[in-house]
Each structure stands twice: as structure tokens, then as C-alpha cells.
Image (cartoon, coloured by chain):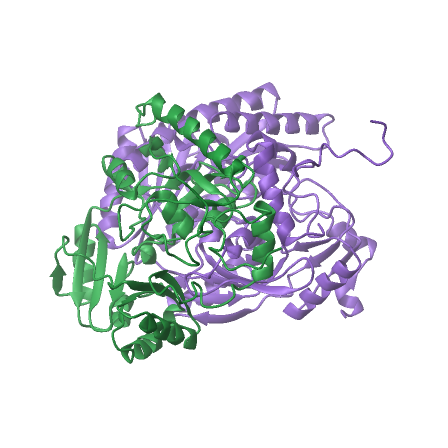
Amino acid sequence: MGLTSGIAHDVALEHARAVDELAATVAAADAVAPCGAGTHWEVGGPPPAGVRVHAPSGVLAYDPHELTVTLGAGTPAADLARVLAAAGQECPLDPRDSRATVGGIVAAGLSGHRRLRYGPLRDHVLEVHFVTADGRVVKGGGKTVKNVSGYDLPRLLVGSLGTIGVLTEMTLRCRPVAPIASWFVTDRPPDAVRAALFRPSAVLWDGTTTTVLLEGHPDDVDTERAAARLDGRRPASAALPWPAGPHRGRVSVRPGSLPELATRFGRIEGLRWLAEVGVGTVHVGCDEPATLGAARAAADDVGGWLLREAGAPELDGFGGPLPNAALMARIRYAFDPTGKLSPGRLPLPPP
Amino acid sequence: MLGPDRARAEPLELLLYGRDAGVERGEAAAVCFPATGSEVAAAVGVAARHGRPFVARGSGTGLAGGATPVDRPVVIVTTHLNRVLDVDPVDRVAWVEPGVLNLDLSRAVRHLGLHYAPDPSSQAACSVGGNVATNAGGPHCLAYGVTAAHVVAVDVVLPDGTTAQLGDAAPDQPGYDLRGCFVGSEGTMGIARRIAVRLTPNPPVVRTLLLDFAAIDDAAATVSGIIAAGIVPAALEMMDAEITRAVEDFVSAGFPRDADAVLLVELDGLAGGVEAQVEAVREVGRRHGARTVRVAADEAERALLWKGRKSAFGAIARIAPDYYLHDAVVPRTRLVDVLRQVYDIAREQRLTMMNVFHAGDGNLHPLIVFDAREPGVWQRVHDAGDAILAACVAVGGVLSGEHGIGLEKRDKMPLIFSADDLDAQARLRDAFDPAGLANPQKVLPRGSRCGELQRVPEGAWV
């Protein structure tokens, strides 16, 4: 049955040994910088000083019948994808850089480009194990697909940027891969396209071109394509038009405010962007730090905010104090009284 | 602050609000009925100033004692806060007050081709605020996810009487996911006074199938077979022989009275995929010995099948006056094994047991039916409940899939969490509620905080 029994006992033993070692390192250190593959090392506040620690990698348990997989937080997303694909399943993490580790994705709170259909990252994380500041190993959540037993520590850890604990292990929800997946491009406006579709997996828009991902039964993909008048099929091998540049960020805005934001973005020279229509995430990239600052101002104007993801070191990571900062600080320092985990990563006042 | 009609301490009210739909009974000091968000904040503020505990309460349909007053708190009832405040069809988000009933919300957005996906069996009576507190589920959560996946923001009164918006209609908020922490916190982190929920487009095609089996093992094997075929149905429910007969006697939906188990399978989406899945489910069922596969011919027949499933708890009232229900979740592959143990436990304790549950996600609902007037029966019911939880946990299950921990399962938490795990949960809760006034004594057992057990009482001999 499944892969659970097939996974070498050694992996579990090696994982336990590595977690013990990690816990001892964390307990002894004054400052700790948990690190995945470093693909999003600059997200938010300045990269923390301290002892760099890495979580073990490897799939610990996978039974396709359960639609769940348990793995070391240091497992690269590409490795996970390969294991799941062998059983016709996937976990739609979709990091832009597939070297990213699953733990890094969870800590950075990176939802993939199929969020419109499959929901945000936080909905896929069922259980987490993490090392606390004082070196204890704590479990939150549970391995079953449904669970309301106790407080939702997995959701607290998603996007916590290494400030609550060092993730060591997680259980994720998986799903069967759709029979077919097809990309289309059109110059029709994204709202009209989306309104014509029932459950698109992604609708991306850069201000001129709308790129659509449809997944499902071949007949349905055809019907949907016709309904939304999507003529240009885009080769699956073509890379998504992620905005490139040394200075990058991610805007979060109400989906209904996207047209307004696009108008403002259109006036910013040198700004490249790609919006997730219906979600409200907008990826931006540029060559000059000042351009990223201008993008942030535009996001603020429409009630959104911009997270600095790379470059522009002089730009504040979050663009201001965090909402409910006092409550967040109480949570942070309840778990890490001396603030030694990823110091400086989240702008929270000391207790 | 509130007039005498909306702040009560008469014996009748105190009795009425002394419990929820679970079995535990408590005692309230006073009951109040705020009608606006500011009145909720004022009520919590008064409680906080006087160091008086408070408990939020929606419709009182909770089954785990989450709204049962302990430590003589002020019970704050949200049923008067029942307005749908704003519906945004572009963002597909609605702001509602906590007392809005689950089903009323879906009715309010039906004309837009949208609905609110979480659908507990009590959806005609339970409130969205209560759903948020328990992170409620329902049959359709198999494909659509539980309440936490459908709440984008909550405007809350924190236990100290201050207010905060947690989450946002924008996809991500900077910092921690406080919204995610709050949903499912069973009233221990404050009271929601406005809730922004995600609305889901109605599927163009819906097919509902009823499969019946001569052996419950075959039904369980069919559940696994459907998942193995790469299908995640919108809902996948199982009813055993006893409950199927009870339901058929109650609603006459045409459920086979001689079946050992029936499966209710719902598939939704676009026509091509749905029709292919209908055929696949039919085939999987046949392969595992389904005697008949009935596909609802129209909306009326579909509604009748669901009425049968959702009125299971009404149906059993005709058999015995009392019932006791657990909702542990087990790995799907262990369903047959655990069900067998559940029946053995019932036999050992000489109790009538029925099973109607969310098979697709392994969420059991073993239902013990009894007459509380029978001497000694409560002890046997409790012993059976304990044995069932132990059996579920032994195969890697969890205590609750959708009802919550409340008072009822609080002391079972150490079955699945270590002292360090519970300590971490207590830290999160205490950060929200340093004074410990919000729904005290719920969710976490005594001794969850590190050092709580070791603390030596003042004046004690050491």
C-alpha cells in the first residue's frame, strides 16, 4: 500500500537525528536565521544576522489514498512535486523558483499562481513541527485532511518569516492532477474573461495581455475556451511572464481595485507587473529602486500594500508598521521572549 | 448601556443560556443581547473592567459545550446582529454580522449565482459567527474546505474590549495571519462583530448519486476507490444500516431499508468532467458490489436525498430521546477498521449506535442513541465515547473534525498533543487574552501552560 511503507526507515531516523541537532543549535544560539534555499532570502525586513540553520529534507510519509504528504521542511519543492507526480497528484505550491524549499515557501507565505482556483498556501498546510526558541520541538495541527482540534498553529506559522519557530516538518494536503492543463493568451480585458469562466486556475494580466490557465476535463476546457473566446493557445513550455529585475515586490490589493491600480502603474516608467486577477496579488519588478518606491505609493493609494521581495535595500520591507502590531508583538515574544529568531525580519516593537 | 430587555439575569434566561446543543451544563451570571457592533464592544469592555469572564453565543447549536458558561460569565448573545451588510460580486466577498444564519447568507446571494460553501447539517439554524468560532465544516467541505478557507477577515472585539480587524479582502496582510488564528478559537480570543466571507460561484452542473451496499466494508472500499480514481467529489457521505432505516422512516426519500450502508456522492463542476466522474463512480461502485446506483434525476430528487442526510439527527429523535455524538477524524484508509471497533464498543456497552458521516475526509460521526432516564446509562455512554476517541487516535486520527473541543473534549487534548504542544497553544491564546476572561476553561486542559502543574500553592508544605 502506498509509499508510506516504501519510504526507507533511514529517512525517518536521519530526520529525527537532524531535528535533535537543530534544536540543540537553536537552544544554544543568541540569534538564529532559519534558511531554506535562499530563493526569497530578502523578503520583508533585512535578512537576519545569526546562526544559519537548515531543516532536514526528504519525504517522510506519503499515501496517495489519504491525499496528504509529510516531509522535512528543507525538501525542495521540485523534489516534492516529483514524488507526488509519480502517483498522479500534486500540491499546488508553484514557487517561481523550484529550488525553493517547502519550509521556505511556508515561512515566506508564498501562494502560487493557481491560488484563484486552489486557494492560498495556508489552506494546504495541515500540520507543522517547529523548533521553539528554547529548543523544544512542537507540533501544531494534525495529519488528517480535516481537523479543528485546538488552536491553528499551522496558520500562525505560514508567513511568519521564521519569527515563531524553525519549521522542521509539515504535512500538506495534495490533490489529483487535472486530466489536462492548457494555457491561453488573449488581449481581451481580464474581467470579461474571468466573468465568462467557471473555475479558471489562473487569470494573469500585465496591462495588455491576459494569460489564462484552464485545468480539467478536455471537453470542459474546450467549452470554457470557446465561452471566453480564448483563441491563442500558449505553449506549456513558455515561461510565465514574471516581471524581472533586481528590485522586486508583491502587492496585495482588493481584487476589485486592480483596474485602478493598473491605471496608476501605467504611469510609472520602467515598472513591469503581472496581476493575479480575482486574487489581488500583483508581482512587480524594475531596474531602479525608486521605481519600486513609486509602485508602493500607487498600491497605498488604492488601499493595498507592497511587500519588498528583493533589491531596493533602502526601501522598508513592509512600508510601515504592521497592522495590530501590539498583538503581533505579544504573540511573537510569547514564543520567543528574547527575539532571537530571525531578528529584524518583522518590524515589531520589543515587548 | 443596554436596556433592561436586552440585559437579563432572570432564572429562566440563565437556565436557557446555561448550555448549547452539547451535553454539558453551566451557569451564566447574566445574559445580554447587543444589537450593534459597538454594543458588543461595550459589553466586553464592561466585563473586562470588572474582571468578569464572558462567553459569546450564536444560535447555540454547538455540540462540544463551547458556548456553555463556566465560571459564571456574562453570556453575550449575537442573534440580534443578523444583517448582511455588504455584498461585493466582483471581489466575491460579503460582510455579515455574526448572527446571520448560515443558510440565510446563501439565500441572500443566490441571485448573484453565488453561495457560502460551508454547510453544516444545522445550517438552517446555526450562525456564521458560531461557524467562525468552531471553524465549522459540513458535507461540501470535502472539496471546498472548512470555514477557515472561506473567511477573509473578521472585525473583532478583543478580550480587553478594544477592537481590531484581522485579515482583509486583499489576499495577504503584512505580518501574522491573525484571522487564521481567530477562526476556530471557540470564543477564547474575543468576539467577531463583522465577518467578511468568501462567496463561491454556483457550479453549472451538479449530480447526486445514491449507492447502496449489502456490506459496509464494500461502501468503505468504494470511498477509497473513488479517491484512488483521482476524483475529489464535492461531498461523499456514508450512512450505516440503522441510520438509513431511521431516515427512511422519517423522510421517505427512497433510501433502501435493507442496505447495510449507503453512500451519497455529489459531483459538481462543468458538464464534461462531471459526467465522466459520474460514470467513474458508477464503475467503482459496481466493482465493489454496489447493489444499485441511483442518480438523482432532477433538483427535487437531489434535494430529497440531501434532506435525508441532513435530517439524520431529527430522525433519531423518534428512536430515543437522547443522543451523544463524537466527530473524530481518522485517516481514510483506516475507516473500515475503525468502524468495526466502533460497533464492538457499542456492543460491549450495550448501546444503540448509528453512523452517518463525512466518509470522504474520514470525519466520523458515531451517534449513540439512548434514554437518559435509564439508570447508569450515562456512564456507559461516556465510556463508549472515550473508547471511540482512543480507537481513532490510535490509528493517527484527531479528536474533532468540525465540532470543536469546547468543554467536552478539552481533557482529551493530551491524547494527541504533548505538554510542549499544549504550552505553545496556550501561549497563542494568552497573547490574545492575557487576563483569561474570554470563554475560560475551554479548549485547553488545566496544566497546559508550562509550569502550571509545578506551581506550588501558597502556604503549602514543600
Tell me the shade of chain A.
Answer: green
User: How many labels, in total?
Assistant: 0
Quarter of the N terminus of chain A within the rendering: top left
Image height of A24 relative to A196, above or below: above
Q: Nearer the viewer, residue B1 or A318?
A: A318
Please provide percent x and percent y for residue A230.
16, 65
- Is residue B407 in view? yes
Quarter of the C terminus of chain A within the rendering: bottom right
Image height of B346 relative to A26, above or below: above
List the single residue furthest toward the top.
Answer: B348
Corner quadrant of residue A229: bottom left
Image height of A266 relative to A28, above or below: below
Q: Nearer the viewer, residue A294 or B371?
A: A294
Q: Is residue B105 left or right of residue B351?
A: left
Tell me the shade of chain B.
Answer: purple
Q: Nearer the viewer, residue A120 or A229?
A: A120
Please provide percent x and percent y for residue B122.
54, 50
Corner quadrant of residue B258: top left
Please provide percent x and percent y for residue B349.
62, 21
Q: Residue at image x 56%, y 38%?
A: A134
Please provide percent x and percent y for residue A282.
33, 65
- Is residue B327 in view? no
Q: Nearer the viewer, residue A80 or B142?
A: A80
